[in-house]
Image: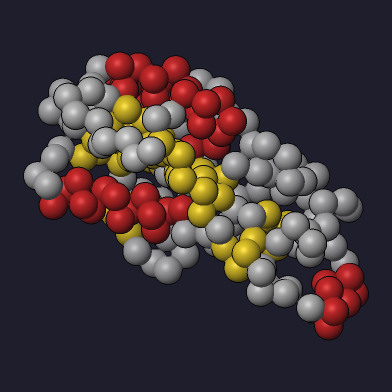
Amino acid sequence: MIVGFPRNIGWIEVVCGSMFSGKTEELIRRLKRAKIAQQNVQIFKPRIDDRYDAVRIVSHSRQQLESIAIERAEDLLRHLKPETQVVGIDEVQFFGAEIVPVCESLANKGLRVIAAGLDQDYRGLPFEPMPQLMAVAEFVSKELAICVVCGNPANRSQRIVSSSDRVVVGAEGDYEARCRKCFIPEPVKASAQENLKLRLRG
């Protein structure tokens, strides 16, 4: 059954997936279309994510839009303009559990909220608060990358640098997209020899 696009209400859209799956690119596409429709758009990102730019949201393919870098979820509400109709949030998983009630409050006020983020951490486990945010969202889109080992659809982020911290902001050289078969959750870092064996096998 096809559900009609909401009208005259607020709602939440979640774009999720692994690293290199095009989440930010899809977020940018939706926000650009909202701007074409003459809607007032505000975009937010976590200050911790300064990989490509300190204030813009930037996809791995280098598409970008101006945004506001904030520390905490509640900072979004302080920066929100009265005329804003659409709110975009990139790397939403970095804001923690506080982002869920913030998104709900925005949607309850009649705003369209589009949030993009990782749904799994480097261990392949659900990355809170994404499960909670997806549960209250009206629309959820899961993007898939391409496994660098075998070329199959990939939905996991293989960390290839040594760290046991759950949050390690990185890009190419720090992570790889992997499929279920080629993903190595433990140890934290697959050795160079293990990665070579996987590629030869694939």
* Relative depth, front residue between 46 and 127: 127
Q: Residue 80: percent from the left, percent from the top?
A: 25, 27
Residue 80 visible to an observer of this rendering: no
Q: Quadrant of residue 38?
A: top left
- Up the image or down, 63 lies above or below 142; here it is below
- Up the image or down, 178 lies above or below 202; here it is above
Figure disc tally: 0
Residue 59 visible to an observer of this rendering: yes
- Up the image or down, 40 lies above or below 36; here it is above
In the picture provided, is 201 more to the left or to the right than 107? right
Q: Residue at x 27, y 48 (%)?
A: 31
Q: Quadrant of residue 130?
A: top right
Quarter of the picture holding the C terminus: bottom right
* Relative depth, front residue between 200 and 43: 200
Q: As drawn, which residue projects farthest toward the bottom?
A: 200
* Relative depth, front residue between 80 and 142: 142
Q: Residue at x 27, y 36 (%)?
A: 4
Q: Residue 30: percent from the left, percent from the top?
A: 29, 50
Q: Residue 71: percent from the left, percent from the top?
A: 46, 32
- Up the image or down, 202 lies above or below 118; here it is below
In the picture provided, is 18 more to the left or to the right than 1? right
Q: How is the image coloured?
A: secondary structure
Q: Residue at x 57, y 45 (%)?
A: 118
Q: Residue 141: percent from the left, percent from the top?
A: 46, 45
Q: As drawn, which residue projects farthest toward the left?
A: 38
Quarter of the picture holding the N terminus: top left
In the picture provided, is 31 more to the left or to the right than 61? left
Q: Residue at x 33, y 59 (%)?
A: 64
